[in-house]
Amino acid sequence: MPFKPNMNPKKNPMPSQDPKVRAHNFHEVTTGYTADTAMDEALRCLNCKNHPCVSGCPVKIHIPDFIEKVKEGEFEEAYKIISKSSSLPAVCGRVCPQETQCESKCVRGIKGEPVGIGRLERFVADWHNEHNTENIPEVPSNGHRVAVVGSGPSGLTCAGDLAKKGYKVTVFEALHTAGGVLVYGIPEFRLPKKIVQKEVDTLKAIGVDIETNMVVGKTVTVDELFEMGYEAVFIGSGAGLPRFMGIPGESLKGVYSANEFLTRSNLMKAYLDDSDTPIMKAKRVAVIGGGNVAMDAARTALRLGAEHVYIVYRRSMEELPARKEEVEHAEEEGIEFKLLCNPKKILGYENPDDRRDPKNGTVIGMECVEMELGEPDASGRRRPIEKAGSEFTLDVDCVVISIGTSPNPLIKSTTKGLDVNGRGGIIVEEETGHTSRDSVYAGGDAVTGAATVILAMGAGKIAAEAIDKELSGKNS
């Protein structure tokens, strides 16, 4: 019996903590759909003949098929459909920019809001994690071994896809915990770490080995991995090298890169009262930048006890690159946006006569200048231009710089014949992820620079397919 479609032009709202409450805790902001709400939202899907939403998904999830199962209340079957394409559904349902990908293609978005595809994916994954008791069946070994460098989204996806085909995969992670940017970069209130651990445990259950505290390029090199018997190597080492502005005062106490600030809070649990990890719990914090990482840093600073947190961004709200939902959540929580504003100098308290003074070299403010938008630059965005005579000082005692990251040069510097571009990204064939080295593949932020979780996953999937094609051909 066909289902009567839900023609409500708006998505079912996502339940969430009250902004005044959540701004002072690290619990997840949104609480997820109930089964009834998920089924009602699924009824908004028209199951279009051409399935345009699938074309917007970097990992090509069969979206209408899984939503159809949600309509029927067959949540485990929906999960099985998603997991054929995605190794990290509970993660993607929370952090992927669906509004510019699958949901941007949804025909319901023409005259209203698109179907809440990401919210449904999250519901299905969470339902599976809570209710499923089936053991994951073992996959017979095909006799081939593959090494994966990095346990972020691209590495975990590549490892998972290969393990499902019978490959013996070992993931080498530099940090003490698997997950890459999912554990060190994205805050607990957006992505609980127990969710990441559950996804990692699922991969372990299908045979993926994960070796932590292994810095490829130091502990072991790419060449040595081949000597150890691995037949192919996938490099998904991310983009963990922070960029700075090159303005005076960046070496003062109280100035962080967003990477360091978030790593201390997320991975090293500095937000917990009994944590041994030091982090500045400042009263007035400026976060320079306008991307998702900047929003994460600003909202983290607020939860650490800041009374005023500013997003300092040199363009307008229309050019702000962060997800709409993240900006809305930040505004609701009280983050203050200093738009069309650019830092010129970070000011510090200095007492050169007494180097023992604990305040020596500590941030006390930031000189800024107002901007206006001129003609579009190479990126297509209007170029910000300084307004003469508009300088002012922002009263802050901590500055977090979030203007992007670059791939770490360690692997390049220790691997002969690995070509990189001017930004330090590994050069690959777009269709396969193959690098300039035989049997070496790469993907994710190590290639593109800082990008989204789902794009990194898509790159890991492409490389896994190419590795399988290469190694399975050895049996023919």
Image (cartoon, rainbow, N blue to C red):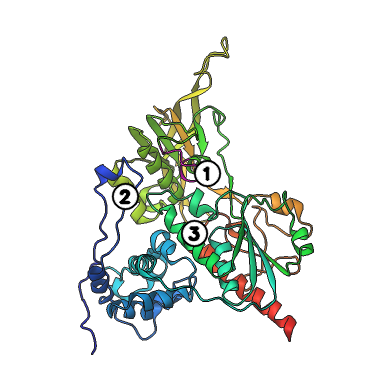
The answer to which image quadrant residue 211 occupies is bottom right
The chief SS type of the magenta part is: loop
Could you tell me residue 10's position as x and y percent?
23, 67
Magenta stretch: includes residue 266: yes
Residue at disc 3, secondary structure: loop
Specify which label sits upstream in the sequence, 1 or 3.
1
At label 2, the amino acid type is His
Judge from the rendering whether residue 439 lies leftward or rightward of residue 210; answer left or right: right
Could you tell me residue 461's position as x and y percent?
56, 71
Comparing 126 with 404, the one in front is 126
Q: Which residues are magenta?
A: 265-272
Q: Residue furthest top?
A: 353
Residue at disc 1, secondary structure: helix
Q: Residues within 10 Å of mark 1 (few under 14, many from 20)?
A: many
Q: Mark 3 and mark 2: span between their CA atoms?
A: 19 Å
Is the residue under label 3 in contact with that under label 1 (CB below 8 Å)?
no
Q: Which mark is residue 123?
A: none
Is the residue under label 2 in contact with that under label 3 (CB below 8 Å)?
no
- The residue that mark 3 highlights is 452
Query: In the displayed structure, would residue 105 be above or below residue 365?
Result: below
Could you tell me residue 143's position as x and y percent?
69, 76
- The residue that mark 1 highlights is 259
- The residue that mark 2 highlights is 329
Query: In the displayed structure, would residue 385 be above or below residue 469?
Result: above
